[in-house]
Amino acid sequence: MMKSKINLIALCLTLLTNQSAYSYGSYLFCTNSAVSGSNSTIKGIGWNWAKGTNGSNLQNAAINNYQNLVKFYPKGTWINGSSDLNTSYNYYLVVDSIFENKNAAINFCEALKQKCQSDWGSTFTGIGVSTWDIPRAAWGSVTVKYKLSYNRYDRLACKNWKYTEYEALYYKPDDYMHTFMPLMH
């Protein structure tokens, strides 16, 4: 009996310590800015998953500058990050990087947009994430952190169906619900 408890504890510790070997994040999808209303939620018309290894990533030089943050898999394009949820139940994937300044953060968002346009056409200008760290039934916004000054950071949301400009995200303590524990990928 004691041996089985020790084995169970050892298994749990192994799983917890090996979590760092996995990437956390969600899959990128692209929204069509030319579609509105109920059609915007129809896959293939209002949105599509960004293509993975069989997609356009080889031609998209901008996205290749972020290989530490974006991975291409057969079924899609993965963005490394962790999820936030505020009290209004808005999901955000916070990208696993702090960019040097606001322009560098915007350049990352633009590279994701170019990936979407390369995959699906010029009207696919909005980007979002879903699955894994963002619940499969939800659409999450991609957010990036950038330096303001020494030890001070700000966040902005990449453009999508909710954020039409690169807007700073200001969380008040009452708005902040929690950061999800990462899921293994």
Image (cartoon, rainbow, N blue to C red):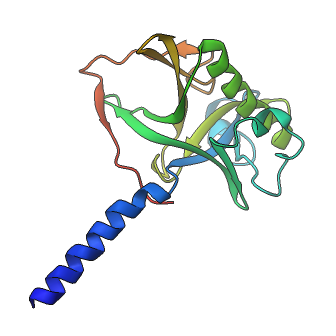
Q: Residue at x 35, y 18 (%)?
A: 171
Please tell me in which quadrant of the rendered image residue 32 appears.
top right
Q: Residue at x 71, y 22 (%)?
A: 107
Where is residue 99 shown, x and y percent of the image?
Answer: 58, 23
181 left or right of 81 in image: left
Front residue of this view, candidates 90 and 172:
172
Where is residue 67 shown, x and y percent of the image?
Answer: 70, 43
Looking at the image, residue 174 lies above or below residue 30: above
Front residue of this view, candidates 131 and 59:
59
Front residue of this view, candidates 98 and 114:
98
Number of numbered tags placed on the structure image: 0
State whether residue 42 appears in this view.
no
Q: Residue at x 55, y 13 (%)?
A: 167
The residue at the far front in this view is: 150
The residue at the far right in this view is: 59
State whether residue 24 appears in this view.
yes
Quadrant position of the N terminus in the picture? bottom left
Front residue of this view, candidates 152 and 41:
152
The residue at the far bottom in this view is: 1
The residue at the far left in this view is: 2
Where is residue 153 shown, x and y percent of the image?
Answer: 45, 16
Please tell me in which quadrant of the rendered image residue 180 appears.
top left
34 left or right of 118 in image: left
Where is residue 157 shown, x and y percent of the image?
Answer: 55, 23
